Image (cartoon, rainbow, N blue to C red):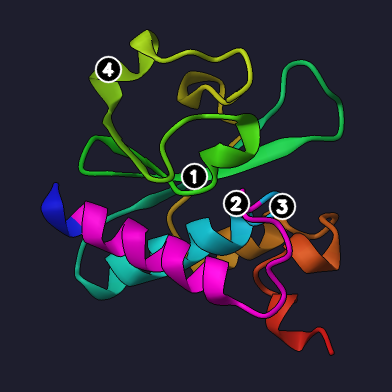
Amino acid sequence: MEDLLKVCRRARAWAKRHPRCEDGDLLGWCGICSLRIFSSLRWMGKKPRFVMINNPYSNNESHCAVLCDDYLLDVTATQFDMPRSVYVVPKIELEDLEYDRWFWNYRIACFIGTTTKSIKKQFKYWPCEQDPFRFNKLS
């Protein structure tokens, strides 16, 4: 679990230092940070799964996170007023977490990707500034 926590802390620190980051809670950065975590874990030889979940209370809102080694990894839950900046939570404990603001529930995931190519297709209709594949191309 320590290696997962280290990757997550690095991703969050990178995002907060990024010149385009205007929100300390990382609002709109879930896809960007999750892809960074996903890519880092793949590079380490792990088998992460990129998860995209639709908000059951809104038709046009989604959230991204990563599942790896039976842990949920999320570094942008602060945008939902969650108290911790980094979540590395065993899947078995997810049922105990508060979902009121941190809306996502891995059991109702609308997409689980294991390749960069499959993940890229999911961001087709996302705003450019939130799409990790177009993010670096913005001027």
- Marks 2/1 in contact by CB < 8 Å: the verdict is yes
The Cα–Cα distance between marks 3 and 1, rounded to whole angstroms, is 12 Å
Q: Quadrant of residue 103?
A: top right
Quick one: label 4 or label 1, which is nearer the N terminus?
1
Examine the structure image and report whether residue 25 is included in the region drawn in magenta: yes
What mark, if any, has residue 14 been given in the picture? none
Looking at the image, do the residues carrying marks 2 and 3 touch, with CB atoms under 8 Å apart?
yes
Going by the numbered disc 2, the residue's amino acid type is Cys
Crowd class of label 4 (few under 14; some 14 to 19; many from 20; radius 10 Å): few
Q: Which residue is mark 3?
A: 28
Q: Residue 100's spot in the image, x, y percent?
A: 61, 13
Q: Is residue 55 above or below residue 22?
A: above
Marks 2 and 1 sit apart, C-alpha to C-alpha, by 7 Å
Q: Mark 3 or mark 1, which has the lower sequence index? A: 3
Mark 4 and mark 3 lie on one chain; the one further toward the N terminus is 3
Which residue is located at x 54 percent, y 46 percent? 76
The three-letter code of the residue at mark 1 reads Ala
Residue interval drawn in magenta: 4-26
Q: CA distance from mark 4 to mark 2?
A: 21 Å
| Residue 113 screen position, x and y as percent | 50, 50
Q: Kindly identify the residue that appears in the image at 21 percent across and 71 percent down.
A: 44
Q: Amino acid at mark 3?
A: Gly
| Residue to which mark 2 is pinned | 30
Q: Secondary structure at mark 3?
A: loop
Mark earlier in primary sequence (2, 1): 2
In the rendered structure, find residue 93 and report the number of the disc placed on it.
Answer: 4
